[in-house]
Amino acid sequence: MTQPDSIKKVLIVDDDDAVRQTITAVIKRLDLACSEAAYVNSALEMIAQEDFDVIFLDVRLPDGSGL
């Protein structure tokens, strides 16, 4: 599959391991760099350290809202 040139790095934030792993598998099949986080705080730390082109964010997380 081909992806748009503007999308290179994706962050998946979901506390459900199965959901996070499924989305990650699909993203990796598109040959995109993919990082994962299960908590809001972890995601915020990752975002502070690097830029992501797309973030898939669960709305309800154990340590806060994805909104």
Image: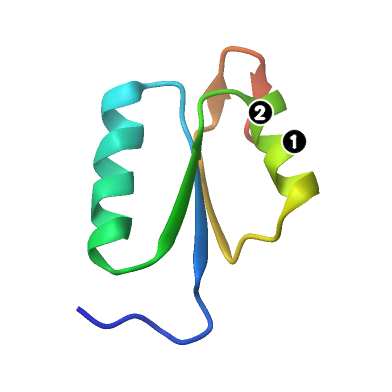
**Which colour assignment does the render follow?**
rainbow
Q: Secondary structure at mark 1?
A: helix
The x and y percentages for residue 47 are 72, 47
Q: Quadrant of the N terminus?
A: bottom left
Contact? badges 1 and 2 (CB < 8 Å) = yes
60 left or right of 32 in image: right
Q: Where is 37 relative to 62, above or below?
A: below
List x then y, in percent, for residue 64. Answer: 68, 19
The image shows residue 34 at horizontal and vertical percentages of 44, 53
Gap in Å between the C-alphas at discs 1 and 2? 5 Å
- Residue type beneath disc 2: Ser
Nearest the viewer among 18 and 35 is 35
Q: Label 1 neighbourhood size at 10 Å, few (<14), some (14-19), many (20+)?
A: few
Q: Which mark is residue 36?
A: none
* Quarter of the picture holding the C terminus: top right
Please tell me which residue is depicted at 59% across the width and 23% down the height of the picture.
39
Check the image and report above or below for 17 versus 49.
above
Mark drawn on residue 42: 2
Residue 48, placed above or below residue 10: above
Up-down: is 14 above or below 1? above
Q: What residue is drawn where x is 56% and y is 20%?
A: 61
Dot 2 surroundings within 10 Å: few (below 14), some, or many (20 or more)?
some
Give left or right: position of 49 versus 33: right
The residue beneath circle 1 is 45
Position of 57 with respect to 28 (left or right) is right
